[in-house]
Amino acid sequence: MTQMNLMRLSDLNRDNQLDMSGEGVYNPSGNTAYGAGGDKIGTVRDALVDPSTGRIRMLILDVGGWFSSKEVVVPVGEARFDDSGVYFDNLTKDQVKNMSEYRYDQTYSNEAMMADERVLRGANTTETESTYRERAYRTPDRLQLLEERLMVNKERFSAGAVEIGKHVETRQETVNVPLQREEVIIERHAVTDARPVEGAVLGAASETMRVDLEAERANVSKQAYVTEEVEIGKRTVTETQTVTETVGREVLDVNKTGEVQLTDGQTMTDTDRNRNNR
């Protein structure tokens, strides 16, 4: 492998207008980097990839957590990827100190790459150069365990309607009205000292008296009055509704055949060990 066959992931993205945020695309740039012992060493700034396949071969680290200003290139096989960041479990501060400084405006030469390989291999003389390269530049496979989570959305719908109108309701109402009327009063008085009437002939003349009588009568009419006013509006109220659904998650199954020891970077419980040893 020579450095001339690799290019920066950011340049590949820029030149080919790639969507590095799409589903199934893993872009490590911007992830927090951790070294040996879980020390936070800085940030993954970029990656060097095979332009023909897009496979990541090297990661460019800003090791500002250990040194004030330095970037180094580490083979991707030295990394362990996690949702919380990128872990370099075997990378020490002394190794980073002895590694070549990477600069964007300079080519990461083949000589610098080989020198960094020797630093990373350290005192491990049992691992040949070809074996180290096969391991160090192999893109790690990631087995993702999926978990279902409830996604609750809300939609508005017509829950009903209220129509407001009015109608006439009747009732019988009785009112006592005092009415006046005139009556005829006839008073008769006996004459004790009868006196003669000169020239009067009985039945000769007939006299009639007319008295007009008046009375009151009730004239009923109706008048409308405002007795109540109704204002119509609406308001929004919030209520909590409990939604229950069944969700699932994927659980890792490890089947061992023969005398195999597993190292996955995680602490296994007794239950896990018993299940994996079956």
Image (spheres, grey):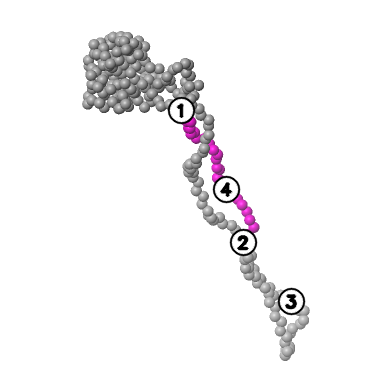
Q: Earlier along the polypeptide chain: callout 4 or callout 1?
A: 4
Q: Earlier along the polypeptide chain: callout 3 or callout 2?
A: 3
Question: How far apart, in angstroms, are the residues tagged by discs 1 and 3?
Answer: 143 Å
Residue holding disc 1: 270
| Amino acid type, mark 3 | Ser
Residue holding disc 3: 206
Q: Position of residue 35 (x, y in %)?
A: 30, 24
Label 4 or label 2, whichever lies nearer to me, is 4
Considering every residue shown, the one lying at the far front of the view is 259
Residue holding disc 4: 166
Label 4 or label 3, whichever lies nearer to me, is 4
Q: Earlier along the polypeptide chain: callout 2 or callout 1?
A: 2
| Amino acid type, mark 2 | Asn
The residue segment tinted magenta is: 147-175
Which disc is residue 125 wearing? none
| Amino acid type, mark 1 | Asp
Magenta region, main secondary structure: loop
Question: How far apart, in angstroms, are the residues tagged by discs 4 and 3?
Answer: 69 Å
Label 1 or label 3, whichever lies nearer to me, is 1
SS category of the residue bearing label 1 = helix
Q: Determine crowd level at label 4: few under 14, some 14-19, many 20+ residues with C-alpha closer than 10 A.
A: few
Q: Is residue 217 magenta?
A: no
